[in-house]
Image: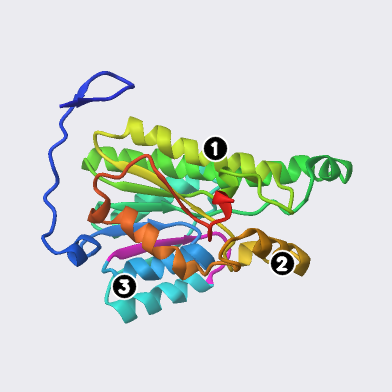
């Protein structure tokens, strides 16, 4: 019997019943996974990987209605259930309503939740943004999407996990939560990503009796979220990354699959950095 730090109440911690074959440990067959920010980039790659691994998937988007058709194609290709939901992560009521709708649509359970939706900070140094009169607006936009959105998802899916007695929450953080990467200057984004890493660690302790919580910190990945950068900035990225290139979204999905699957039943409160070596420099 272990005890939580928060309450001191005993929590039973039986060993899980794991498959004998290691490949079966990574299978998501029979599981329901919800992925936010799934219309492209990392979220899109994770959604397809989870479908390939056998999960039924609920995929969420903010404005790209093309995900509705993508979900149909994933369902047909991989013989799983896939449904798209329009849900702005900045709208707490909509987040709650969407999670409740996913429960109704997928048999009353969510086994895995990937809080992935996010936006970049594109306004450069904070004081320069202030001089242009955009600092407050952009700070609020980044904070609401990248931090509050994760909080809303965590709060409502956490209640689902507690009722079920199991679940895995995976939060997309960033290497920017570990280091101040350059040459782009993005204090707000860095602070927010550091915050969600610590949020994940804190929730891992709070939820130890019924769910696991982890985060993943990607480095520079070829996705639409980084399309605002100029070529000179990209070249500087490559100079500072030991592997000398940006990563592909598909190079992240192994980490997400690990944390979603029974291969990681003893992993909680950790952050997996996938950054081509940037943070070790």
Quick one: SS at disc 3? helix
Q: Which residues are magenta?
A: 55-65
**Up-down relation of residue 213 to residue 273 (above or below):** above
Can residue 22 be seen here? yes
Relative to 179, is 44 above or below?
Answer: below
Q: CA distance from mark 3 to mark 2?
A: 34 Å
Residue at image location 53% in from the left, 70% down from the top: 65
CB contact under 8 Å: marks 3 and 1? no
Q: x, y (%) of residue 193?
A: 56, 44
Q: Is residue 228 visible?
A: no
Q: Earlier in the sequence, mark 1 or mark 2?
A: 1
Q: Which one is nearer the viewer's eye here, 252 or 170?
A: 252
Query: Is the residue marked by circle 1 packed among few (<14), some (14-19), or many (20+) residues within 10 Å?
Result: some
Residue under the point 88% across and 46% down = 132
Q: Are marks 1 and 2 in contact (CB under 8 Å)?
A: no
- Whichever of labels 3 and 1 marks the residue nearer the N terminus, that label is 3
User: Which x, y percent locates residue 95?
Assistant: 46, 47
Q: Position of residue 47 (x, y in %)?
A: 40, 66
Task: Return the residue at label 3.
Answer: 52
Q: Is residue 76 left or right of residue 227?
A: left
Mark number, residue 235: 2
**SS under mark 2:** helix
Q: Residues within 10 Å of mark 2 (few under 14, many from 20)?
A: some
Of the pair 233 and 280, the residue shown nearer to us: 280
């Amino acid at each position: 019997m272990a005890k939580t730090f928060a309450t001191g109440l005993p929590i039973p911690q039986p060993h899980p019943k794991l498959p004998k074959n290691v490949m079966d440990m990574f299978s998501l067959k029979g599981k329901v996974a919800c992925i936010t920010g799934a219309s492209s980039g990392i979220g899109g790659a994770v959604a397809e990987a989870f479908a390939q691994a056998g999960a039924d998937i609920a995929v969420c988007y903010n404005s790209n209605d093309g995900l509705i058709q993508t979900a149909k194609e994933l369902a047909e290709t991989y013989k799983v259930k896939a449904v798209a939901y329009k849900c702005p992560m900045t709208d707490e009521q909509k987040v709650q309503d969407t999670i409740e709708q996913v429960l109704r649509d997928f048999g009353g359970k969510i086994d895995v939740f990937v809080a992935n939706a996010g936006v970049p900070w594109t306004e450069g140094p904070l004081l320069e943004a202030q001089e242009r009169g955009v600092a407050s607006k952009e700070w609020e936009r980044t904070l609401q999407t990248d931090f509050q959105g994760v909080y809303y998802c965590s709060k409502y899916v956490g209640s689902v996990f507690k009722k079920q007695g199991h679940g895995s929450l995976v939060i997309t953080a960033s290497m920017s939560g570990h280091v101040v990467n350059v040459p782009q200057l993005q204090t707000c984004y860095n602070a927010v990503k550091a915050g969600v890493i610590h949020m994940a660690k804190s929730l891992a302790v709070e939820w130890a009796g019924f769910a696991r919580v982890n985060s993943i910190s990607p480095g520079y990945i070829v996705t639409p979220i980084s399309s605002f950068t100029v070529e000179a900035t990209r070249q500087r990225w490559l100079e500072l990354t030991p592997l000398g290139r940006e990563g592909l979204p598909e190079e992240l999905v192994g980490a997400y699959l690990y944390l979603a699957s029974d291969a990681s039943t003893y992993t909680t409160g950790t952050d997996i950095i996938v950054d081509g070596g940037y943070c070790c420099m």
